[in-house]
Image (cartoon, rainbow, N blue to C red):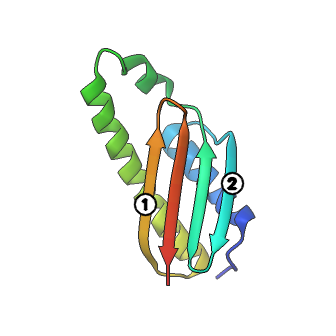
Amino acid sequence: MEPISKKKIATLYTQISQEIFNVGVNTQKIDIIDNKILILAQSKRMPALEALSEEYRELVMSLDAALSTKYKKMLKQKVELLFDIKVTSLFRDYDPVTENSCTVICFK
């Protein structure tokens, strides 16, 4: 078990991004408030999704949702394992236009 730190969260967040999307994170702002972790990040969109976004909007939206679900599952598992905490809720949203994401992790 390690103490929760912004640096470790940033590293973990970037590792998962690289593993799933094959792109890193450009910027991150992380705040830890009581039993909540807030991550505001900006990262490049996957080129393949960008290429399909105009002609296959519905497909890309479905892929975005599936990838986000996978991301949240991996992040929850790794946060719980690394910090030995129980994540009670994890919320994540990504705006493909601005390439910004917001993640909130609530834990006991």
Task: Provide the secondary structure element on which disc 2 rests.
Answer: strand
Looking at this rendering, what residue extends furthest in the left direction? 58
Q: Residue at x 64, y 42 (%)?
A: 25
Circle nearer the N terminus (2, 1): 2
The residue that mark 1 highlights is 91
Q: Which mark is residue 31?
A: none
Task: Give the number of callouts.
Answer: 2
- The amino acid on which the numbered mark 2 sits, given as a three-letter code, is Lys
Q: Residue at x 28, y 37 (%)?
A: 62
Residue 97 falls left or right of residue 60: right
Residue 45 relative to residue 59: left or right: right
Tell me the quarter of the picture where residue 8 sits.
bottom right
Pointer 1 local density, CA inside 10 Å: few below 14, some 14–19, many at least 20 = few
x%, y% of residue 5?
72, 71
Q: Amino acid at mark 1?
A: Phe
* Front residue of 3 and 61: 61
Residue 16 as seen in the image, left or right of residue 70: right
- Locate residue 16, reporting x and y percent: 55, 51
- At x 46%, y 43%, the residue is 94
> Relative to residue 93, is residue 49 depicted above or below?
above
Secondary structure under badge 1? strand
Residue at left 47%, top 38%?
Answer: 95
User: Residue 3: x and y, percent?
Assistant: 70, 80
Above or below residue 56? Residue 26 is below
Point out which mark residue 29 bears: 2
Would you say 33 lies left or right of 99 here?
A: right
Front one among 57 and 83: 57
Quadrant where the N terminus lies? bottom right
- Mark 2 to mark 1: distance in Å? 16 Å
Query: How many residues crowd around disc 2 within 10 Å: few (fewer than 14), some, or many (20 or more)?
Result: few
- Which residue, as the protein is rendered here, is positioned at the far right? 7
